[in-house]
Image: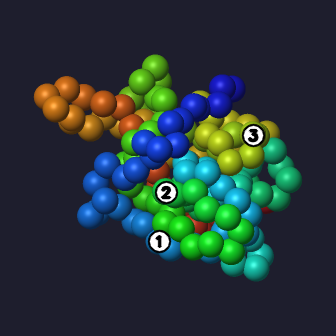
């Protein structure tokens, strides 16, 4: 399993008008591109797949922020900023055992976060992640 690198300042929805983006209150400081879960108090913090109880990934932070701040979070849609050019189109993207990060293979617990897809850009094709976080499944 390898963690997927990102360029935080480039993390943004490809199609913002059709993406499912919500405002959330943070429970801790996060950077743009962090994968988030919802805590029992309703705030959002860094998710991971290592079985520590943080594995119910709910979205990707579209901005950095500190505890108590409100930011935008992508729940569903294509997203720039992740280094996935070496991955195959349609490959599944997983939550990593590393807190707040994605991986190219399942961690201790299998938490699917999205798939690699291709979008047109300036006459060529660019690989991005299509996120579709599952808000109904209980992972633990």
Work out whether 121 lies above or below 53.
Answer: above
Compare marks 3 and 2 and give the one earlier in the sequence: 2
Residue for badge 1: 22
- Dot 2 or dot 1: first in sequence order is 1
Q: Which residue is drawn at 40% across and 50% down?
A: 12
Disc 3 residue crowd, few under 14, some 14–19, many 20+, Cα 10 Å: some
Q: Is mark 2 on a helix, strand or loop?
A: loop
Quadrant position of the C terminus in the picture: bottom right
- Which residue shows up at 62% across the image and 34% down it? 103
Which quadrant holds residue 68?
bottom right
The residue that appears at 28% across and 54% down in the rendered structure is: 15
Residue most toward the left? 123
Q: What element carries label 1?
A: strand
Q: Where is residue 50 in the image (x, y as percent from the top left)?
A: 81, 44
Name the quadrant containing residue 1. Answer: top right
Closer to viewer: mark 2 or mark 1 = 2
- In the rendered image, is residue 95 in sight? yes
- For mark 1, does the 10 Å Cα neighbourhood hold few (<14), some (14 to 19), or many (20 or more) residues? some
* Residue 138 seen by the camera: no
- Tag 3 residue: 98
Write down the residue under mark 2.
Answer: 62
Residue 52's x, y, as percent? 85, 53
Identify the mark nearer the N-term, 1 or 3: 1
Labels 2 & 1 near each other (Cβ < 8 A): no
**3D distance between C-alphas at marks 2 and 1:** 10 Å
Using a 10 Å C-alpha cutoff, classify the residue at mark 2 as few (fewer than 14 neighbours), some (14 to 19) or many (20 or more).
many
Residue 3 against residue 11 in the figure, above or below: above
Task: Tell me if 7 is positioned left or right of 37 in this view.
Answer: left
Q: With respect to residue 23, does 64 lie above or below? A: above
């Amino acid at each position: 399993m390898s963690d997927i690198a990102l360029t935080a300042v480039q993390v943004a929805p490809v199609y913002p008008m059709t993406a499912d983006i919500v405002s959330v209150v943070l429970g801790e400081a996060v950077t743009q591109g962090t994968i988030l879960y919802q805590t029992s108090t309703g705030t959002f913090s860094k998710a991971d797949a290592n079985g520590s109880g943080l594995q119910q990934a709910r979205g990707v932070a579209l901005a950095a922020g500190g505890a108590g701040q409100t930011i935008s979070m992508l729940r569903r849609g294509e997203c720039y900023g992740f280094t996935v050019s070496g991955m195959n189109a349609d490959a599944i993207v997983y939550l990593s055992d590393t807190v707040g990060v994605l991986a190219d293979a399942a961690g201790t617990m299998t938490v699917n976060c999205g798939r690699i897809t291709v979008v047109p850009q300036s006459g060529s094709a660019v690989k991005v992640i299509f996120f579709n976080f599952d808000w109904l499944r209980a992972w633990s």
